[in-house]
Image (cartoon, rainbow, N blue to C red):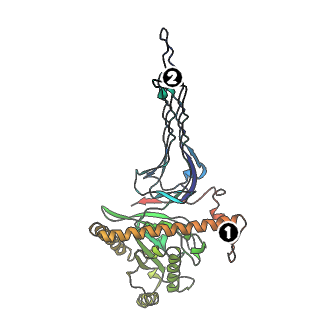
Amino acid sequence: MKFVDEVSIFVKAGDGGNGMMSFRREKFIEKGGPNGGDGGDGGSVFIEAVENFNTLVDYRYTRRFNAQNGEKGGSTDCTGRKGDDLILPVPVGTTVIDSATQEVMGDLTKPGQRLMVAQGGWHGLGNTRFKSSTNRAPRQTTPGKPGEARDLKLELKVLADVGLLGLPNAGKSTFIRSVSAAKPKVADYPFTTLVPNLGVVSVDRYKNFVIADIPGLIEGASEGAGLGIRFLKHLSRTRLLLHLVDMAPLDLTDPAEAAATIVAELTKFSPALAERERWLVLNKADQILEEEQEARVAEIVERLQWTGPVYVISALAREGTEQLCYDILDFLEARAERIKENPEFAAELAELDSRIEDEARAQLQALDDKRALRRSGVRAVGDAEEDDSFWDEEDAEDGPEIIYVRD
């Protein structure tokens, strides 16, 4: 299934049915009076979060959706049939934005959550409504009101407890393969991961958490370089970030500089996201002699001035990954318990989440505006040449898959 996390659609609610002008006509009954019925209300448009969806691909090629119109009123005081509501299913984690105003209409984070995005038109009134003691044969009716119409932008942010950060080839995909049943593509060249991959990590028999791997970041990602900037938004809903660093890169680059690059790009994208709880995970320890590991770790930690948790693992050999997963579960459980017991802590997290959402949306909107200018032939001073073909949704026919599996 093709992974699509942003789409633009047009929705139109149904128009209300017109009122009927009719008079009673029966044999041997004179002056029967008005009996025109009201029209039916137009159907509304709703967007509903559904559990088994994980992509917005259904809205990539069909982008106009109309709810049913209400029927006109009938004679003998018959009311017209109400138009059926239109319900559009989306994955859990979808944000609905009004394209005209950039207003966030709703955030669907729970299965079954439903949001009305276009109100159906009100029904028109039949001439029966206008009869009175002084107006016994009214010929007035009212037309139905038009339904609301909106251009919407749907943004999907995958729901995961833990997010992975790192340069391309830092071992993020290998890590998620080693701790879950997800099987993202792994190769010895950069950018093998093109879309987020999700895996369910089972720690105990009835305890698990969801981990998300996004495409690797490179220097300049916050300005649009590479692929990771587009998918950094998927980390905004996570509770913990794991920063994976290659301890023994094949190109002999400095691990400390690589780690600092990721922190810098993360901060540029969203300073609030950089405040999220983050652990340093030094990967590929099996590529270094045991007597050199301790010195290498100490050097990286010192140069980064890192004060948080540090883990040394080998995702390929599955060394240290089990203890890391147990510690992650303990952290998530303790965090959830503290949220229940400490309202101030819960409020702080809610405020941080709100800032992350706002900053991420502002960055992505600015990037979209810049891409739109480039495609129209306008390029800002100092902008580097960039291949936008990866993001050309109209021309892309095939694409990568998103995998979400459980052990």
When asked about the image quadrant of residue 66, the answer is top right
In the image, residue 48 above or below residue 360: above
In the image, residue 388 above or below residue 80: below
Residue 284 at x, y percent in the picture: 46, 79
Residue 36 at x, y percent in the picture: 50, 25
Q: Give the SS element for disc 2.
A: loop
Q: Along the polypeptide, which appears first: circle 1 or circle 2?
A: 2
The answer to whether residue 223 is left or right of residue 375 is left
Residue at figure coordinates x 43%, y 59% from the top left = 405
- Would you call the spot at circle 1 few (<14 residues within 10 Å), some (14-19), or many (20 or more)? few
Given residues 190 and 51, the one toward you in this image is: 51
Residue 69 at x, y percent in the picture: 54, 37
Q: Can residue 289 be seen?
A: no
Q: Residue type at mark 1?
A: Asp
When asked about the image quadrant of residue 251, the answer is bottom right
Nearer to us: label 1 or label 2: 2
In the image, residue 101 above or below residue 45: below
Residue at figure coordinates x 49%, y 64% from the top left = 197
Q: Which residue is mark 1?
A: 387
Residue 184 at x, y percent in the picture: 50, 65
Given residues 250 and 120, the one toward you in this image is: 120
Residue at figure coordinates x 67%, y 57% from the top left = 395
Q: Give the SS element for disc 1.
A: loop
Q: Residue furthest front?
A: 134
Q: Residue type at mark 2?
A: Ser
Q: Which mark is residue 314?
A: none
Q: Which residue is mark 2?
A: 75
When asked about the image quadrant of residue 398, the answer is bottom right
The answer to whether residue 129 is left or right of residue 205 is right
- Mark 1–mark 2 distance (CA, rounded to whole Å): 63 Å
Q: Residue furthest right?
A: 377
